[in-house]
Image: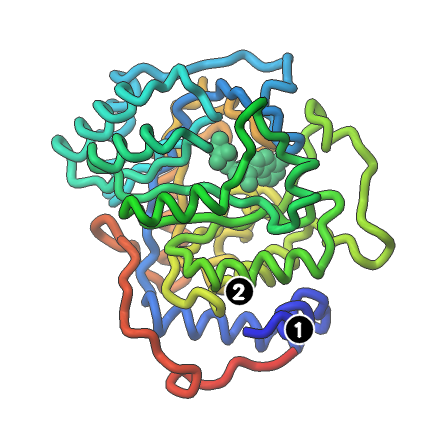
Amino acid sequence: MKHEEILAWIKEDGPAKLEELWARADEVRRLRVGDAVHLRGLLEISNNCVRHCGYCGVSLNNPNLTRYRMTGQDIMACVRQAETLGYGTVVLQAGEDYGLTREFIAALVRDITSQTPLAVTLSLGERPEADLEAWREAGASRYLLRFETSDPDLYGRIHPSLPGRPSDRLALLARLRELGYETGSGVMIGIPGQTYESLARDIQLFGELDLDMIGVGPFIAHPHTPMGKSAWTAPPGEQVPATEDMTYKVLALSRLVCPEANIPATTALATLNRASGREQGLRRGANVIMPNLTPPQYRVLYDIYPSKACIHETAVECGDCLRQRIEALGRTVALGPGSRSRRQSGTEAEFGETPTP
Ligand code: SAH
C-alpha cells in the first residue's frame, strides 16, 4: 500500500468510506487468518524498570508506585491457570527489569515449555542479545517490542536512551528475527507530537518489516509521567488524535499491510470503549485477544496507563467474559499456540481490490 493511500485513510472521517475500510480489513482477516480468535494469556511479571520512557507509568520517573516482581512459583501457578482456561500462549511482560535475570527467565521458559503445551511470548524490553539468545534457546518462540514511532526525533523525545546504550528497537527487531523469534512490534496512536505523516510511515514500516504480530493502541496520558503533564502537540491540523476511531483505522490498515499477522484488539483500546472496543477491533482486522492473567494485587500496580480495562477481574472472570464476547460475534476460540502461518502470499488480484480512500 502506498504512503499516500495510507495517509488518506488515516485522515478519512466519512462514515460510509470508513465502512469500506472496516469491511475490507475484516474480509482480509477472514481469508488470511480465519475466524478463530487466539487467546494469549498476559502475565505482567514485574513493574520494575530501568528506563525513563516519557509515556509510561511504570518508568523510573514515577516515584509514586509500589514495585513488585513475581516469584517463579507465582508465575507457574498463573501459567497453569492459562492452560486450564484453554489458552494456547502465555505472554510474559514486564518493565525492563534486570532483577529478572537471564537465568531466571531461561529456567522459567524451560519449565513452561517442558511442563505445558503453551507457547511462550516474551515482552521484557531492550535486553542484551545474550539474554535474547539464551531465552530463544530455552524455548521462547515470540518476542514483542514496539518501536512506538518511526519518527527518530519523536522517539528520542519520548524514549530516552540509557547512558552508553543507544536505543535502537529496529536493530533489535532484526536481531530477534535472526534468532528465530516470531517478531511483534507496533506503535501508540496519538502520542503528543505524532503527525499523520509519521503515523502513515509507521504503518508502512509494519509491512516492510513483515511483522508476525502487530500491537497498536491509543496513547493514554498518565498523570505521573512527563508526557501526562506536558501540553506538547504537533502543529495545528497535523496532530494525530488518540481516539477510538483512529485506533480502528490503524488496526484495519495494519491488517491490510500485513495480512497474515496476528493482531490483538488491545487492552488500551478496550480502555477507551469498555462496552465494545474489543468486539469492534475484532471486526476491523484483529484476530487476537490478550486476557489478563496477572493476579489482581499485582495487576493494579502494573500501571502503565490509568483506568486500564479489566483491572479488578480475576483471570477466570476475564477469560469467561472474553469467550462469551467472541462467540457472540459468530467467531470461534482457537485451540493451540496459534503461531503465524506463513501461507503463500496471495496477490491483490486474488483477494480483490483494496478500496481507495
Ligand atoms: N517494557 C516493555 C513492555 C512495555 S508495556 C517494553 O518496553 O517493550 C507495553 C507497551 O505499552 C509499550 O510498548 C507501549 O506501547 C504501551 N504503553 C506504555 N505506556 C502507555 C500509555 N501511557 N498509553 C498507551 N500505551 C502505553
Q: Is residue 161 above or below residue 339?
A: above
The quadrant the C terminus occupies is: bottom right
Q: Quadrant of residue 330?
A: bottom left
Amino acid tagged 2: Ala
In the picture of the structure, the residue carrying the numbered disc 2 is 252
Callout 1 crowding tier (Cα within 10 Å): few <14, some 14–19, many ≥20: few
Count of marks, rendered view:
2
Per the model, the C-alpha gap separating discs 1 and 2 is 16 Å
Q: Is residue 319 above or below residue 105?
A: below
Mark earlier in primary sequence (1, 2): 1
Q: Quadrant of residue 140?
A: top left
Instruction: Residue 30 in the image: state x and y as whole percent.
Output: 37, 70
Task: For ligand 1, tell me if the residue under mark 1 lies within 8 Å.
Answer: no
Question: Which is in the foreground here, disc 1 or disc 2?
Answer: 1
Instruction: Residue 201 in the image: state x and y as whole percent.
Output: 61, 60
Q: Which quadrant of the render holds ligand 1?
A: top right
Amino acid tagged 1: Glu
Q: Disc 1 on helix, strand or loop?
A: helix
The quadrant the N terminus occupies is: bottom right
Residue lying farthest to the left in this orientation: 114
Q: Are marks 1 and 2 in contact (CB under 8 Å)?
A: no
In the picture of the structure, the residue carrying the numbered disc 1 is 4
The residue located at (51%, 25%) in the rendering is: 302
Instruction: Residue 80 in the image: state x and y as whole percent.
Output: 22, 29
The residue located at (39%, 60%) in the rendering is: 261
Task: Say whether residue 277 is visible.
Answer: yes
Q: Is residue 147 left or right of residue 261?
A: right
Task: Say whether residue 310 is visible.
Answer: no
